[in-house]
Amino acid sequence: MSFGSGLLFPIDAPMAVAVPPFTLRAALFERGSWSVETGLTWYRLSGLSLREVGFVVNGPLVRPFHSFVIPLSVNYSLSLGSDEQLVFGAGGFAAIHSLYELDDERLAQAWLFSSTNYARLQTSSAIGQSNTLGWTATVRYERQIDDRFGYRVGLEWFDGSSPSPIEGRFYAESLNEVPVEGGFEIPDARLDYRALGLTFGLLIRFL
């Protein structure tokens, strides 16, 4: 079993920090060099980007929220000596999110930049909520200090998405200064949960 902390580097979004010591990992099953592992990581996300918006957006469209990641992976351990090993794993993950909100200012800026119809634009919108499923791969280095304690450091890749449809109203001014107002929908928008994680922590063997 291990616990510690880590960093998460999402695609087109700010770095996030795992709340220590909530980067937990534990083996459900072990046989020889193979094991099945699960765990829990609590990330304080500074925002995430969205896929399938329909125009280019630079930066996260989703405001900060909390995400609880539960991985399940099949691992293979390659011995590097009597007290150290490399662990390779692959599997899936589920990410359970707190409520998240859309950054309307960034959405309006991106929409305006991609449009040739408006001189000014504002939006007032809501985003659909959903948790995320995806796949994950990991590699990490582990070293035992003594019979009970050790340490680990590793990299994890997460690749997932979840439906987050957007609907709301826009308030704009056309190029000839005529006010325009209406409703809009982005039904195919998806939360983009592609990220590289760096984890580190303490290994504990229960004798």
Image: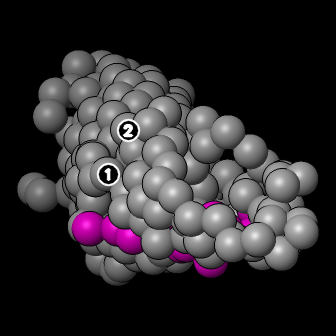
Q: Nearer the viewer, residue 123 or 144?
A: 123
Q: Looking at the rendering, which quadrant does residue 113 occupy?
A: bottom right
- In the displayed structure image, the side of residue 34 where residue 160 appears, left or right: right
What residue is pinned by disc 1? 128
Residue occupying image coordinates x 25% and y 67%: 98
- In the displayed structure image, the side of residue 118 where residue 186 appears, left or right: left
Q: Which of 91 and 117 is in front in this view?
A: 117
Q: Looking at the rendering, which quadrant does residue 91 occupy?
A: top left
Residue occupying image coordinates x 40% and y 44%: 165
* Magenta segment boundaries in residue numbering: 99-110
Residue type marked 2: Pro
Residue type marked 1: Gly
Q: Helix, strand, or loop for circle 1?
A: loop
Q: Position of residue 39 (x, y in %)?
A: 24, 50
Q: Which of marks 1 and 2 is nearer the N terminus?
A: 1
Label 1 to label 2, Cα distance in Å? 7 Å
Q: Judge whether residue 142 can be spotted in this image.
A: no
Q: In which quarter of the image is the N terminus?
A: bottom left
Q: Do the residues labelled 1 and 2 touch (CB within 8 Å)?
A: yes
Q: Is residue 80 magenta?
A: no
What residue is pinned by disc 2? 163
Q: Quadrant of the C terminus?
A: bottom left
- In the displayed structure image, the side of residue 158 where residue 68 appears, left or right: left
**Mark 1 Cα within 10 Å, few/some/many (few <14, many 20+)?**
some
Residue occupying image coordinates x 50% and y 42%: 186
Q: Helix, strand, or loop for circle 2?
A: strand
Q: Which of 79 and 176 is in front in this view?
A: 176
Q: Looking at the rendering, which quadrant does residue 201 occupy?
A: bottom left
Q: Is residue 107 magenta?
A: yes
- Point out which mark residue 198 bears: none
Q: Position of residue 145 (x, y in %)?
A: 43, 65
204 w.r.t. 25: above or below = below
